[in-house]
Image: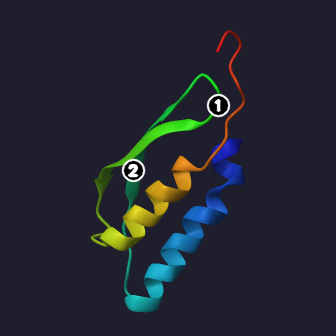
């Protein structure tokens, strides 16, 4: 639910990239770790066919700001 709720942020990064390159397309996979407090502790691009570092960096930065529910027991 958290990922779906924040997909607009990912779309924003992509749309910004389209301003520089109207033919921009591809997939970006992001690995991220959620800490015991529900905050994203780390995130990085696992793989990408986008070939647009600025967009990839934007997506990672956004993912790092996401807040997930705190798990039972931390």
Q: Which mark is residue 38?
A: 1
Residue that appears at 36% across and 47% down: 44
Marks 1/2: CA distance?
20 Å
- Judge by depth and name the residue closer to the eye, 26 or 37: 37
Q: Position of residue 38 (x, y in %)?
A: 64, 31
Q: Are marks 1 and 2 in contact (CB under 8 Å)?
A: no
N-terminal-most mark, 1 or 2: 2
**Do we see residue 22 in this rendering?**
no
The local crowd at label 2, few if under 14, some if 14 to 19, many if 20 or more residues have their Cα within 10 Å, is: some
Residue that appears at 67% across and 50% down: 4
Q: Position of residue 51 (x, y in %)?
A: 27, 70
Q: Which mark is residue 3?
A: none
Position of 63 compared to 27: left or right? right
- Judge by depth and name the residue closer to the eye, 2 or 64: 64
The secondary structure type at the circle numbered 2 is: strand
Count of numbered tags:
2
1 or 2: mark nearer the eye:
1
Residue that appears at 36% across and 67% down: 26
The secondary structure type at the circle numbered 1 is: loop
Quadrant location of the C terminus in the rendered image: top right
Quadrant location of the N terminus in the rendered image: top right
Please tell me in which quadrant of the rendered image residue 67 appears.
top right
Q: Position of residue 41 (x, y in %)?
A: 49, 35
Picture layout, residue 15 above or below residue 63? below
């Amino acid at each position: 639910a958290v990922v779906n709720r924040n997909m607009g942020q990912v779309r924003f990064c992509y749309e910004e990239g389209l301003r520089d390159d109207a033919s921009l397309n591809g997939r970006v996979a992001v690995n991220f770790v959620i800490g015991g407090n529900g905050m994203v502790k780390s995130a990085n691009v696992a793989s990408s066919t986008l070939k647009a570092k600025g967009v990839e960096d934007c997506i990672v930065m956004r993912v790092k700001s996401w807040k997930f529910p705190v798990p039972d027991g931390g």
